[in-house]
Image (spheres, rainbow, N blue to C red):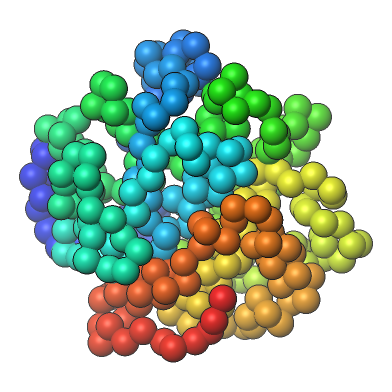
Amino acid sequence: MLVNGVWQENWQPVQNKDEKGRFIRQTSSFRNWITPDGSPGITGEGGFKAEVDRYHLYVAYICPWASRTLMARALKGLEDIISVSVVNPRLTDQGWRFGGFNGSDSDDLNGATYVHELYTKVAPEFTGRATVPVLWDKKTQAIVNNESADIVRMFNTAFVDLVGEGLNMIPEELAGQIDALNEYIYSDFNNGVYQAGFASSQEAYEEAFEKVFTALDSLEERLADGRKFLFGGEFTESDIRVFVTLIRFDAAYHGLFKCNRNMIKDMPKLNDYMHRILAMEGIESTVNIEHIKAGYYSVKALNPTGIVPVGPEL
C-alpha cells in the first residue's frame, strides 16, 4: 500500500481485520460525481460535467467491483462516451500493473506502470490502497471517483442528455427496496465470499460461510416464482451486484475461497438467472474468465504455487 505517497510493502490481500479475524474492507477515498451540468453530486466537489470522451475508466476483469462499472457502462450505452483500460489480472508486489497479459492494456493515457501511480499523480501524499475501478477525468487530470457503487449510479443518470434515458436501473418506485436489498447483498454475499476467503480464524470463516449460503438460498427462493430478475421483469442495480459475484463463484470462490457447500451450477434458478444476464447485450464483453482465474489464483497468500485450474469454462 501507499503511505504518504510511497509504496511501502508487498501487496497483501487482507486490508484489515478485527479481533476475531474477520476481513474488513477499506473504504474508498475519491467520491466526486459526474453530473449533467457539472454541479456537485451527493459527495465531493463540483466541476465534473458529463461530456463525450472526457472520462476514462480503469478496471480489472478479475474484480467484481470494477466489473459493476463495466456492466453499467454497457447497459447505458456509454462505450463511445467513456474509454476504458484493463489492467493485468495477476496481482504483483506493487498491486495492479498495466500490460503483460492477453487482453490487458498499457496505460497510454497517463503512462503509468502501476495503478498506484495514478493515485500519487493526483495526491502525492496519498495513504491507502490503490484500488480499481478508477474513474479518471482527462480534462483536469483528476480521479473523479474510485467507489464502484457511486460510479454505477452516476452512469445511470449523468449522461442521459448525451445518450438518452434508456434502461433506468434505479426506478423511483423501487429505489428504497433496491437500497435495502443492495445492503444485504453486499454484506452477506458480495463481501461475504471475501470474508470467507480471507478469514484468519476458523470462527470468522464459518460465520462468513454461513452468511454466503444463506444469501444464496434466499436468492434461489426469490427466483423460484419464475421472475426474470430480482424485482420481477425489470433489470435493476441489484441484479448487477448479484451477477458479478455469481459469475466468479464456481471459478474462484467455490475452491479458492472455500465457499464449497455447492456450486452455482447446482442451483437451477440462480444458474439460469446468471446466464440470462450474461446473454444481455454487452454483458458478455465485461466478463473474462481467463482473467478471473489468473487473477484470483495469483494471490500468493491463498495459492502459493500459482497454479491456475483448467476448469470450469464460462
Q: Position of residue 217 (x, y in %)?
A: 74, 69
Note whether residue 173 is visible. Answer: yes
Q: Position of residue 210 (x, y in %)?
A: 61, 71
Note whether residue 199 is visible. Answer: no
Quarter of the image where one finds residue 176: top right
Q: Position of residue 263 (x, y in %)?
A: 63, 80
Q: Residue furthest front?
A: 80
Depth check, front residue: 43 or 239 = 239
Horizontally, is 35 left or right of 180 in the view? left
Numbered label tally: 0
Quarter of the figure with the C terminus: bottom right
Residue at left 15%, top 52%?
A: 113
Depth check, front residue: 191 or 272 = 272
Residue at left 32%, top 69%?
A: 102
Depth check, front residue: 171 or 262 = 171
Is 71 situated above or below 314?
A: above
